[in-house]
Image (cartoon, helix red, strand yellow):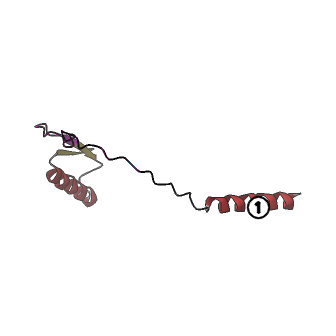
Amino acid sequence: MNKLLNKALLLVLVLAMVAGCAPAATPTPTRVPPTAAPTTPPPTAVPPTEKRYVIKAIEKTLINEHWQFMKDGYEFAGERYGVDIEVGSVP
């Protein structure tokens, strides 16, 4: 009984794997009718704001060299992307 159940389960698993390997049906291309050009361009850019973002990072400790490198990396990324980074540590 156990061997028969194992073989049936194996057959179901193999059939599921084979069914998953079947190629996907290719969609038929549909022709899109040409449209007139819009008179005004869609807004794509966000207007610049004067608000500066502040990101606060809490480190485990700043005594360990690893966390000091992390702090330097945070500050470098903050300068690169124009945000203020405040790094603190747990006492």
Res 12 quadrant in image: bottom right
Residue with the mark numbered 1 = 11
Res 49 quadrant in image: top left
Please name the amino acid that badge 1 sits on: Leu
Magenta stretch, main secondary structure, is: loop
- List x then y, in percent, for residue 72: 19, 56
Quadrant position of the N terminus in the picture: bottom right
- List x then y, in percent, for residue 17: 66, 61
Q: Residue furthest left?
A: 50
Q: Residue furthest right?
A: 1
Residue at 30% across / 44% down in the picture?
35
User: How many C-alpha atoms fall within 10 Å of the one at disc 1: few (<14), some, or many (≥20)?
Assistant: few
- List x then y, in percent, for residue 65: 25, 60
- 73 or 37, which lies in front? 37
Res 37 quadrant in image: top left
Reply yes or no: does residue 45 show up in magenta: yes
Residue at 16% across / 45% down in the picture?
83
Residue at 26% across / 55% down in the picture?
67
- List x then y, in percent, for residue 88: 22, 45
In the picture shown, does residue 21 fall above or below 46?
below
Magenta region: 30-55
Quadrant position of the C terminus in the picture: top left
- 78 or 38, which lies in front? 38
Q: Is residue 66 toward the left or the right of residue 14 in the image?
A: left
Identify the element where label 1 is drawn.
Answer: helix
